[in-house]
Every structure is written in C-alpha cells, then in structure tokens.
Amino acid sequence: MAVDRLFHVSEEAGITRFEPRLPDPRDPPLDRPVVWAIGEQLLHNYLLPRGCPRVTFYALPESDPADVARLLGVTTTRYVVAIESGWLDAVRQTRHYLYELPADSFHVRDAGAGYYVSEQPVAPLGVRRVDDLLGELARRDMELRLTPSLWPLRDAVVASTLQYSCIRMRNAAPQA
C-alpha cells in the first residue's frame, strides 16, 4: 500500500504536537512509544467514535472469489465497515478532528490496516473538523453496515481470505 496522506483522528481539538506514547496494553503489542497515523485510503475505518467496536474488511487480489461473494455481496464498493446498531446515536453525536501529518518520519506498522508509526514528535500540517461522521463516510468508497452483533460477522471475516481489522472488540456487545 503506497503512502498517500497520513492522518491522526481525534475527538480532541487544538493538538499542536503529537508526542510518542506507549499504546494501550489491551491493543496489539508495541514495545516503544510512537505516534500513530492512518493512511488516507483506510481513513474511513476511524471515522467513528473512538470506543466504537467495528469489523472492517476488503478483498485482496488473492482473496477467494467465494469469500468475496459471501462477505462483500453485490456491493460496488471496495471497503466495508460494520458496527453494532447500538452505536448509531454515538456516531451521529461525535465530532472528529482530522490532523494531517507529514509522512517523512513515519513507517508502515501494518500495511493491510493502513497503520503507520513514528518514534519522533510530530506537528500536524493542518486540521479539519468533521461534525457529520455519517456524511463523511458516505463520501468515501465504503459501505457502512449496521448489525445487532458483530460477532458472527467477525468470525466469518477472520476465517476468510479477506484483509480485515477488528477494532475495539472489547467494547462489543457480549456474544450470544
């Protein structure tokens, strides 16, 4: 995945400098403080409230056509982000600030998820406030799915040949 523009998504306004910090111990392990960024291509994965659990996925060139048909269905979009329907009000009420970051000190942490990290402090190039997350998502090449429970979809996606990320699943409704 080529580095296009990099962003840090926050619900906090007025950030003038991002300092490296250790990730939350409940997240994938990383043994050093970093500044996190997301590539513009997968920015839609983060245009949701921070704590909102989600399953995101897309087909790779080598994905099994049966998996693509079963999980992407007849959509014309390349990307799917699924959230629990119970989070819809929070999505409507959340405001984000998209901080564009200079790419020069960043390197890929996970290309499939669009994650980049820098071990250096980073000053944003600019910031844009997003008051309507649903409208922002609608302008991107992605499909937002609402479901009462993410667990059946998560299990199907993890067992597939699609590229996926399961984010903040610790906040998902309990499995039935």
Image: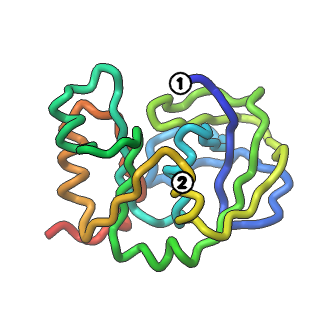
Q: Is residue 93 left or right of 112 when viewed as pictured?
A: right
Rendered view: 163 above or below 81: above
Q: Tell me the residue that label 1 is attached to.
A: 1
Q: Nearer the viewer, residue 96 or 15?
A: 96
Q: Hey, which quadrant is residue 6 in on the image?
A: top right
Rendered view: 144 above or below 166: below
N-terminal of the pair, mark 2 or mark 1, is: 1
Quarter holding the C terminus? bottom left
Q: Is residue 129 left or right of 154 when viewed as pictured?
A: right
The x and y percentages for residue 136 are: 59, 59
Q: Which mark is residue 46?
A: 2
Residue at left offset 49%, top offset 50%: 45
Rendered view: 141 above or below 94: above
Q: Is residue 148 left or right of 128 when viewed as pictured?
A: left
Residue at left offset 80%, top offset 41%: 121
Total tally of numbered discs in the picture: 2
As shown in the figure, which amino acid type bears the numbered disc 1? Answer: Met
As shown in the figure, which amino acid type bears the numbered disc 2? Answer: Tyr
